């Protein structure tokens, strides 16, 4: 019998980790009650990252060593999708340079959207990439602000040489409004935490855990890793105990080092668990949100053959401590610093040009001359090779996964950037091709001529007049966060 | 190589407005200011002009489209007026149009005028603008200093020059231009500065500080050209003739072809310079060129250009700069009028402003700035765009018959 399960996994956690003490230092005069939440740090996406860009990075991590032609479908789950009506997963598909015959869909609606999408994919037979990402806004001075972190995770599911066999799942749906966010609203509105603890976590999720284990005929005590994605200290252990699970099997929710990444969080915890899991381990995943999803896996021997990747551990290590609360607020539109006249350039994106150049812009696909082997970006009618103006000879040449070397660069204080100074420069790709592009998440010490870079998918600019986000590829130092 | 332009066209008259923050005047008034001087110098009537070219870089932000703004400002007699735009080479481009028209015989007398109003944007530096629909999706919308600062990183890496040495050399470039600009009544910036001021100025785009950047200005400059024969017939004795006019445009090699251009020099300038020397019959530029006005939009651009014009050896331009070879009293003065740095940089006017200074120097009319060694060949150079993709223009003027 062909087994269905997880074939591969990946993660993405932004480099900057905002110190919760820095938030409290600024807001304590107004919200002294937050003092108990000031421990640790939370991952915060840069201005040019959103659910789509983080999902792309997690997907690339998860596709390490995987032939992308295998991916038949893709789901992007998030409660913070940038577009309400434009397939967000479609942008991810272009960025991953997947074939047009890819079934892609967005999943949303609740914090368990990631786990639900995973459960749904596991019910099928095709190889599907399940991505979950969230970059949630929180009002300054709230518990949510302290708790929320930004991250993404990827699970490639399907049949074949699975690293974790899917044993089964259980779902319940109840319109329990612990918090909500209306369409178009910026912030969550949350009810009293004690009520959520008793009627939500204990009653709904606790029951789902018990029922799920019973339905699958699994003894709770045999579960090696219990991922109960509830961002409240002590609650996962209490629920585990009541459901007959070993409380010590509870997986660290990473609240002190990442924060609660919403729809991404259950899958992020699953990725972290898979990084250290051994063949034969049983993993339970429980996700909460207007009901609950419970999934059960058994790790196989194939996990020992999975190629190395950055994963959760790699991204956690590629870290920059950040105490700049002002910048954090500014990047989230919560602090109206004057951007100056240079920021006034109209960013209108013609739909026609983006469609014609979608492979170059979203996929970083250049051209390679089939006659001379010259690689260039972007692809053009006539080759850039000065010794052979071959015409119409270029084949698609993906550059996103190639490393590149810095030829020239600067740190520009004059041009408008939400994260000044703006670093950019000229880079040469391994195997040919050149690009002048921005450098993301870098400091002065990290860049010099000759430094190796890798590409990341980011927001290039936002057309604030029309509400359109423009994406492109930027470079980051290559040796950071490598597995 | 074609026969070229050497000695086929003479400059009949030139004019240049005062450059600077011309809060008092619109573009059409600046055009008139430059034109009045040129037409008086030429000693002709406006009705004798057969064709005109207008150079402007940011037309959408000041005068608007077409050649009409020039025709209207000067009330030209319904002749053909063509507007040209080629980044910072726009002024030299307008000159090329007029010179080629005369050389072809299509016009007896032609006018070139460059103008720019940059101080109506509300902020310093060049206006931020689109560079086309494809570029806007995949290119970097950096500032001009940011674009050019990249040259410094590659130059340092290639020639193993320390950050400090290069910073001092480019600082000397600016100190020299400020000293020159102080002597020029038409210059935008007329204050001398010392090395420490330049070295300690706020960083704009690493390693370029405030004083490594030229000012952007309002201004206009104008040339009236004709054949040497007509010039003589009009009573001109000492003729300044066009010796060479070359423009080279990037074709994507620098920006797109990995492993080719190393980022440390200007590919197009080398091509335009080699062609210009050949057109002018100059075989030893370091010995034959009397003075230069180059595109010192940023100090590093001027330094690297000294090598790209084959005056300094590759990798040694920074030493020549520090040795004072390009100072007003050096071997070949560069920016004896203050350059873009201090005379100012109204984009469309700059190429013509450079030729204007060279013209004055060749005729001994440069006042306090006059070079005393009887200059023969004077070179001007523009560079538009950014190091990875640009237009370079080299114009050489000299005494007719030299």
Image: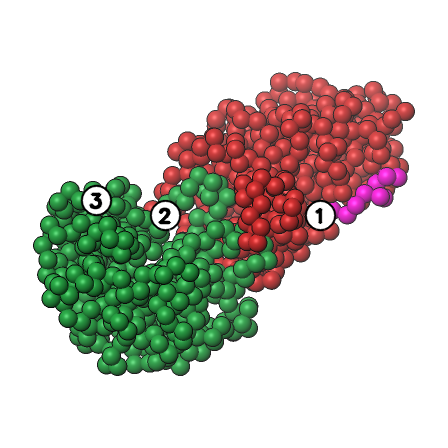
Chain colours: A red, B green
Mark 3 nearby-residue class (10 Å; few <14, some 14–19, many ≥20): some
Residue topped by disc 1: A310
Q: Nearer the viewer, residue B331 or B387?
A: B331
Label 1, residues with CA under 10 Å away: few <14, some 14-19, many ≥20: many
**Marks 3 & 1 on one chain:** no
- Chain of residue at mark 2: B
Q: Residue at 55% across / 35% down in the picture?
A: A358
Along the polypeptide, which appears first: circle 3 or circle 2? 3
Quadrant including the N terminus of chain A:
top right
Q: Which residue is mark 3?
A: B80
Task: Please give the range of residues in magenta.
Answer: A301-309
Q: Nearer the viewer, residue B306 or A271?
A: B306
- How far is the residue under mark 3 from the one under mark 2? 31 Å
Chain at numbered mark 3: B
Residue A302: in magenta span: yes
Residue denoted by label 2: B128
The residue drawn where x is 45% and y is 64% is B270
Residue A151 appearing in the image:
no
Q: Nearer the viewer, residue B242 or A163?
A: B242
What percent of the width, then of the height, locates residue A343? 38, 45
* Separation of residues labelled 3 and 1 (CA atoms): 65 Å
- Cβ–Cβ below 8 Å for labels 2 and 1? no
């Amino acid at each position: 019998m062909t087994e269905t399960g997880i074939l591969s996994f990946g993660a993405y956690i932004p480099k900057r980790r905002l110190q919760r003490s820095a938030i409290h230092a600024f807001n304590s005069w107004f919200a002294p009650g937050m003092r108990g939440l000031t421990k640790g740090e939370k991952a915060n996406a840069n201005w040019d990252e959103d659910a789509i860009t983080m999902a792309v990075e997690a997907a690339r991590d998860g596709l390490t060593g995987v032939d992308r032609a295998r991916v038949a479908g893709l789901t992007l789950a998030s409660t913070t999708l940038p577009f309400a009506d434009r397939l967000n997963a479609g942008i991810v598909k272009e960025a991953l340079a997947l074939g047009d015959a890819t079934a892609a869909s967005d999943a949303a609606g609740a914090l368990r959207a990631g786990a639900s999408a995973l459960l749904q994919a596991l019910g099928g037979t095709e190889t599907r990439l399940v991505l979950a990402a969230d970059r949630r806004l929180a009002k300054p001075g709230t518990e949510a602000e302290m708790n929320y972190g930004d991250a993404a995770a990827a699970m490639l599911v399907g049949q074949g040489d699975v690293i974790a066999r899917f044993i089964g799942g259980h779902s319940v749906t109840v319109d329990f409004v612990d918090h909500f966010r209306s369409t178009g609203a910026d912030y969550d509105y949350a009810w009293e935490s004690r009520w959520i603890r008793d009627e939500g976590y204990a009653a709904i999720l606790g029951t789902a855990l018990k029922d799920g284990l019973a339905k699958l005929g699994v003894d709770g005590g045999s579960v090696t890793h219990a991922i109960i994605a509830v961002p409240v200290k002590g609650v996962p252990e209490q629920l585990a105990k009541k459901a007959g699970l070993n409380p010590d099997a509870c997986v660290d929710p990473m609240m002190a080092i990442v924060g609660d990444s919403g729809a991404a969080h259950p899958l992020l915890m699953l990725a972290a668990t898979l990084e250290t899991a051994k063949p034969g381990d049983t993993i339970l995943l429980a996700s909460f949100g207007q009901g609950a999803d419970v999934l059960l896996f058994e790790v196989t021997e194939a996990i020992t053959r999975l190629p190395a990747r950055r994963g959760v551990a790699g991204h956690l290590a590629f870290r920059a401590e950040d105490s700049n609360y002002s910048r954090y607020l500014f990047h989230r539109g919560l602090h109206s610093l004057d951007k100056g006249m240079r920021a006034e350039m109209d960013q209108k994106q013609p739909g026609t040009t983006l469609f014609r150049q979608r492979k170059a812009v979203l996929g970083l696909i250049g051209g390679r001359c089939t006659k001379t082997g010259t690689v260039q970006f972007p692809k053009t009618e006539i080759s850039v090779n000065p010794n052979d103006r071959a015409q119409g000879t270029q084949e698609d040449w993906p550059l996103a996964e190639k490393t590149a070397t810095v030829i020239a660069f600067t740190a520009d204080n004059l041009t408008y950037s939400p994260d000044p100074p703006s670093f950019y420069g000229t880079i040469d790709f391994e195997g040919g091709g050149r690009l002048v592009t921005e450098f993301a998440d870098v400091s002065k010490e990290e860049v010099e001529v000759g430094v190796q870079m890798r590409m990341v998918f980011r927001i290039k600019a936002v057309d604030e007049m029309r509400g359109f986000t423009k994406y492109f590829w930027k470079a980051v130092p290559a040796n950071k966060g490598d597995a | 190589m074609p026969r070229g332009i050497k000695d086929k066209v003479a400059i009949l008259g030139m004019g240049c407005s005062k450059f600077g923050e011309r809060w008092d005047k619109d573009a059409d008034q600046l055009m008139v200011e430059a034109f009045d001087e040129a037409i008086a110098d030429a000693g002709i009537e406006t009705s004798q002009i057969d064709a005109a070219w207008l150079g402007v870089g940011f037309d959408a932000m000041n005068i608007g489209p077409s050649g009409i703004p020039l025709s209207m400002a000067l009330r030209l007699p319904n002749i053909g007026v063509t507007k040209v735009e080629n980044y910072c080479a726009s002024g030299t481009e307008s000159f090329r149009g007029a010179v080629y028209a005369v050389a072809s015989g299509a016009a007896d007398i032609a006018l070139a005028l460059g103008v720019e109003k940059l101080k109506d944007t509300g902020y310093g530096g060049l206006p931020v603008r689109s560079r086309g629909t494809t570029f806007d999706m995949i290119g970097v919308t950096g500032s001009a200093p940011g674009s050019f600062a990249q040259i410094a990183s590659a130059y340092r890496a290639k020639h193993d020059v320390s950050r400090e040495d290069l910073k001092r050399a480019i600082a000397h470039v600016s100190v020299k231009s400020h000293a020159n600009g102080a002597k020029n009544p038409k210059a935008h910036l007329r204050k001398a500065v010392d090395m420490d001021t330049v070295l300690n100025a706020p960083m704009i785009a690493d390693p370029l500080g405030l004083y490594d950047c030229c000012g952007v200005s309002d201004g206009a400059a104008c040339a009236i050209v004709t054949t040497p024969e007509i010039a003589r017939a009009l009573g001109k004795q000492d003729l300044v003739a066009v010796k060479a006019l070359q423009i080279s445009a990037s074709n994507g090699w620098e920006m797109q072809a990995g492993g080719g251009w190393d980022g440390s020099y200007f590919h197009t300038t080398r091509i335009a310079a080699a062609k210009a020397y050949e057109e002018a019959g100059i075989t030893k530029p370091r010995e034959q060129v009397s003075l230069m006005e180059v595109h010192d939009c940023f100090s590093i651009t001027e330094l690297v250009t000294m090598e790209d014009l084959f005056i300094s050896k590759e990798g040694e331009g920074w030493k020549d700069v520090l040795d004072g070879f390009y100072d007003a009293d050096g071997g070949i003065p560069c920016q004896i009028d203050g350059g873009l740095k201090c005379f100012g940089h109204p984009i469309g006017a700059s190429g013509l402003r450079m030729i204007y200074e060279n013209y004055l120097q060749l005729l001994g009319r440069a006042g306090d700035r006059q070079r005393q060694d009887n200059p023969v060949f004077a070179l001007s150079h523009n560079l538009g765009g950014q190091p990875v993709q640009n237009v370079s223009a080299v114009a050489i003027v000299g005494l007719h018959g030299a």
